[in-house]
Image: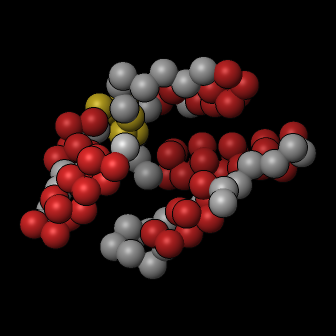
Amino acid sequence: MKLAEYLESLKGGKVQLEILVRGKDADENNKIWDKILEAIKSAGNKLGILKKVKLIGPFGDEWKGKYETISKDVEEVDISTALSVSALAIKDESELVSHQTLRSRS
């Protein structure tokens, strides 16, 4: 199963989510990048980032090239702490038990 298929289950939640799937067609991928950059610009001048994450490989190189065109107009804000506290933290007892069970199996 592809990652995009897993992410589909997140649609319809509290946060509006649109899943964009890249392919092998460079023109279609450019349209996706344009859509992402337009969403960043229209959302204001702040962009939440994970400061310690370094993108590598062709995808990372492509992103860096595209993002460079708007980066001077964007203030980057590190969201790693907020993300770990709100989205990745264990919320209740049943989730804690599930997490411990999964860890013990690996």
Above or below 21: residue 73? above
Q: Residue at x 67, y 22 (%)?
A: 57
Say whether residue 40 is visible. yes
Left/right of residue 24 with respect to residue 88 in the rendered view: right
Give 48 or 83, whichever is nearer the viewer.
83
Q: Hey, which residue is sitting farthest left in the picture?
A: 93
Above or below 9: residue 45? above
Above or below 8: residue 29? above
Say whether residue 75 is visible. no
Left/right of residue 67 with respect to residue 65 in the rendered view: left
Q: Residue at x 28, y 47 (%)?
A: 103
Above or below 97: residue 33? above
Please tell me how many numbered marks the rendered image carries: 0
Image x and y of residue 94, in percent: 16, 69
Name the quadrant containing residue 96: bottom left
Image x and y of residue 74, in percent: 43, 32
